[in-house]
Image (cartoon, rainbow, N blue to C red):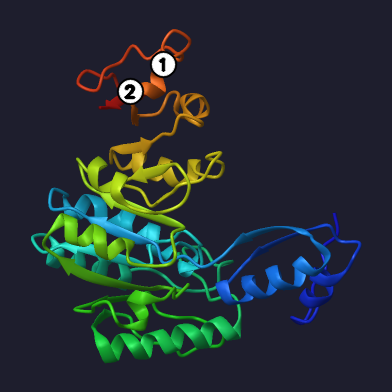
Amino acid sequence: MNFIADANDLGDHMTKHPDIRKISFTGSTATGQKVMASASQTLKRITLELDGNDAGIVLDDVDPKKVAPGIFEGAFQNSGQVCLAIKRLYVHESVHDEICNELVAIAKNTVVDDGSKQGTKLGPLQNKMQYEKVKAFLEDAHKNGKVVAGGSAMDRPGYFIEPTIVRDIKEGSRLVDEEQFGPVLPLIKYSDKDDVIRRANATTYGLAASVWSDAGARVAGALEAGADILIVNRFGKRERDGKGLAHLIEPALDADIPVVIAVSRQSFADWIKFAGGMSVKLACDRSVLDGWWRNVSLRSTTRAAPDHATVCEVFK
């Protein structure tokens, strides 16, 4: 395998070169369109992972102190530079202020510094171009919302942005409608479940979504994100093979937050193997179990599951 670093000038040559047969690109939708158009000239196979504006929905039955650390981690890990990080958080009006206060407290106590230093929680943005983009989102936040934590670039060398919480902001602002890809989280208040599902789905970006609740399976099933797997109570990407999701589930389990995974027929067997030994519910249609029940030991029940047991919650 060869790694080639460039000055943002090799992409066009690679996508057009006749000897390169496959292109995989992760980045913006606009650049992805250019990659696809260029690669089509030589009929290359392509894989694109593009923008996401991943919605998190907090229902009214949560304990704010309990879920806030997981939400913060889901939104701010790697300073928000994660494709499936929470980019916009819809919070039920009955718990909105408490959730906001908890997130503000965490943000203000988060150490932002050089990642090589002991105790650092968040580091800088990766490059100057993204740094400038996030500063533009901060301007939008001050204009269209109320910044209650952070809100500016740090006065020091490097591309450091304060972890920022924004409330009293709505759709129609850049921070809600677009992907910020940085440490800035907007909180949007809602009152009706059907309305918040509609608002969460009102985007062209469907990479990931999450529901934070003790009973959020119905809402989770109504979200339009990804391919066929959705994790509830932990920001959850639906992807066909479930790879790379262990690090998303384990923090929730460590915090005693229940996790539900909506499982498709195609991925049921793999997920049984993956979830074995975890306190995870596999939520699926009853028909998914046909042909599997005799081959998989699922002796635990939803009501009487021992600690660290895999349980299967059957819909329909």
Q: Which residue is mark 2?
A: 286
Disc 1 vs disc 2: Cβ atoms closer than 8 Å? yes
* Count of numbered circles on the image: 2
| Residue 227, image x, y percentages | 48, 47
Residue 153 in view in this figure: no
Q: Type of residue at label 1? A: Asp
Circle 2 crowding by C-alpha within 10 Å: few under 14, some 14–19, many from 20: few
Name the residue type under label 2: Arg
Residue 112 visible in image: yes
Using the image as rendered, state which of residue 138 and residue 34 is in the foreground: 34
Q: Quadrant of the C terminus?
A: top left
**Residue occupying the point 24% across, 84% down:** 145
Q: Position of residue 103 (x, y in %)?
A: 26, 66
Mark 1 surroundings: few (<14), some (14-19) or many (≥20) residues within 10 A: few
Q: Position of residue 292 (x, y in %)?
A: 45, 15
Instruction: Please indicate whether residue 246 sits to the left or right of residue 90 in the image.
Output: right
The residue at the far right in this view is 19
Quick one: which residue is furthest to the left in this view?
A: 94
Q: Quadrant of residue 22?
A: bottom right
Residue that mark 1 sits on? 290
Q: Position of residue 244 (x, y in %)?
A: 55, 45
The alpha-carbon separation of the residues under discs 1 and 2 comes to 7 Å
In this view of the protein, which residue sits in the foreground, 12 or 82?
12
Q: Residue at point 17% right, 49% down?
A: 62
Identify the residue shown where x is 51% and y is 45%: 239
Seen from the viewer's position, the closer of residues 114 and 168 is: 168
What is the secondary structure assignment of the residue under circle 1?
A: loop
The furthest residue to the top: 294
